[in-house]
Image (spheres, rainbow, N blue to C red):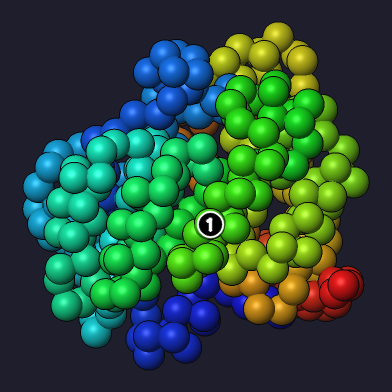
């Protein structure tokens, strides 16, 4: 039906791959006063790393702890070291080199994945990532969320679309694979606006994509707006309808890393149906089969 992360990684590395969520203990320019102090409007206090390890410099310890969490089901598996929370290139290259080198040192860690912002990729950081990529594959995950500037301003993204375009160009120039996050259900966006974002990324032939349901989490400014009745969240049927069309619009080689995502249950305000992750994924898979969803069936190459 679609080019899933699990199947793509198994084909590439020859076994089941698990992500080990690590923390580099960094912050973000929308939090430290550079661009703001409250982060993106939807972002929790954990900086989109609700399931990441607790920050510490001892990456080896974080890796061992993360492995222990999946040990029962990870027999003969290998791992991706995943720096998830906040902005993981928002530090001097000396510190980044130390963290990332430690993370890829174990033999059973086959790749490095780094969540960051496109405006936090200066040339010296890109050079470092290119160097590491010659040792093991490096994936850079960029939080785009939308191509629409009006929405970007509302969510306090803090950079223009051309900054994203330039980051993708520079990463690709040194052989780095790019994975892009988008959010489905952002306030004020129509279905067609969502598809515009997907088409834009399809035309760029990005390496991977994470399709994320909008979650309203306690303690965020988005939660305040939701409580004031300023927007509604998607129900599950509508979300899957949109998701199906997004998958159809993507080129066949784009790896789909995520179909929904989930927020920490203790903080989740809406949509509450998303808390039952097993049911959500089972329903998505069933609907995809029933509706004959096929990736790229509506993709039009230039």
Mark 1 residue element: helix
Q: Is residue 135 above or below residue 266?
A: below
- At label 1, counting other C-alpha atoms closer than 10 Å, the crowd grade (few under 14, some 14-19, many 20 or more) is some
Q: Nearer the viewer, residue 143 or 77?
A: 143
Vertical placement of residue 7 versus 82, above or below? below
* Quadrant position of the C terminus in the picture: bottom right
- What residue would you read off at disc 1? 170
Please tell me which residue lies in front, 206 or 182.
206
Res. 241 image quadrant: bottom right
Query: Measured from the top left, where is residue 82 in percent x and y?
Result: 34, 56
Q: Residue at x 29, y 36 (%)?
A: 91
Q: Which residue is at a point 42% across and 14% down the rendered structure image?
A: 33
**Left or right of 179, for residue 37:** left
Counting from the top left corner in percent of width and height, residue 67 is at: 20, 63
Residue at image coords 19%, 43%: 95
**Image height of 51 relative to 198, above or below:** above
In the image, 122 versus 118, the foreground residue is 122
Give the x, y percent position of residue 76.
24, 84
Q: How many marks?
A: 1
Residue sitting at x 47%, y 88%: 11
Q: Quadrant of residue 126?
A: bottom left
């Amino acid at each position: 039906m679609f080019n899933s992360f699990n199947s793509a990684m198994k084909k590439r590395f020859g076994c089941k791959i698990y992500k080990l969520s690590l923390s580099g203990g960094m912050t973000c320019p929308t939090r430290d006063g550079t661009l703001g102090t409250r982060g993106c409007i939807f972002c929790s206090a954990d900086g989109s790393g609700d399931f990441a390890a607790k920050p510490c410099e001892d990456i080896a310890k974080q890796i061992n702890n993360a492995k222990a969490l999946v040990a029962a089901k990870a027999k003969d598996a290998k791992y991706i070291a995943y720096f998830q929370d906040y902005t993981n290139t928002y530090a001097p290259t000396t510190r980044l080199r130390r963290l990332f080198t430690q993370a890829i040192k174990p033999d059973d860690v086959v790749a490095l994945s780094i969540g960051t912002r496109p405006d936090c990729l200066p040339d010296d950081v890109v050079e470092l990532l290119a160097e590491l990529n010659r040792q093991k594959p490096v994936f850079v995950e960029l939080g785009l969320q939308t191509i629409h500037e009006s929405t970007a301003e509302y969510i306090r993204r803090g950079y223009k679309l051309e900054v994203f375009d330039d980051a993708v160009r520079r990463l690709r120039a040194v052989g780095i694979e790019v994975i892009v996050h988008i959010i489905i259900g952002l306030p004020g966006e129509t279905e067609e606006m969502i598809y515009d974002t997907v088409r834009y990324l399809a035309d760029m032939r990005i390496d991977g994509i994470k399709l994320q349901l909008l979650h309203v989490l306690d303690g965020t400014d988005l939660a305040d707006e939701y409580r004031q009745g300023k927007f509604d969240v998607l129900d599950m049927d509508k979300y899957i309808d949109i998701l199906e069309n997004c998958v159809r619009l993507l080129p066949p080689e784009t790896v789909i890393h995520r179909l929904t995502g989930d927020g920490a249950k203790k903080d989740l305000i809406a949509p509450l149906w998303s808390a039952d992750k097993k049911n959500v994924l089972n329903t998505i898979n069933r609907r995809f089969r029933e509706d004959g969803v096929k990736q790229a069936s509506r993709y039009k190459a230039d």
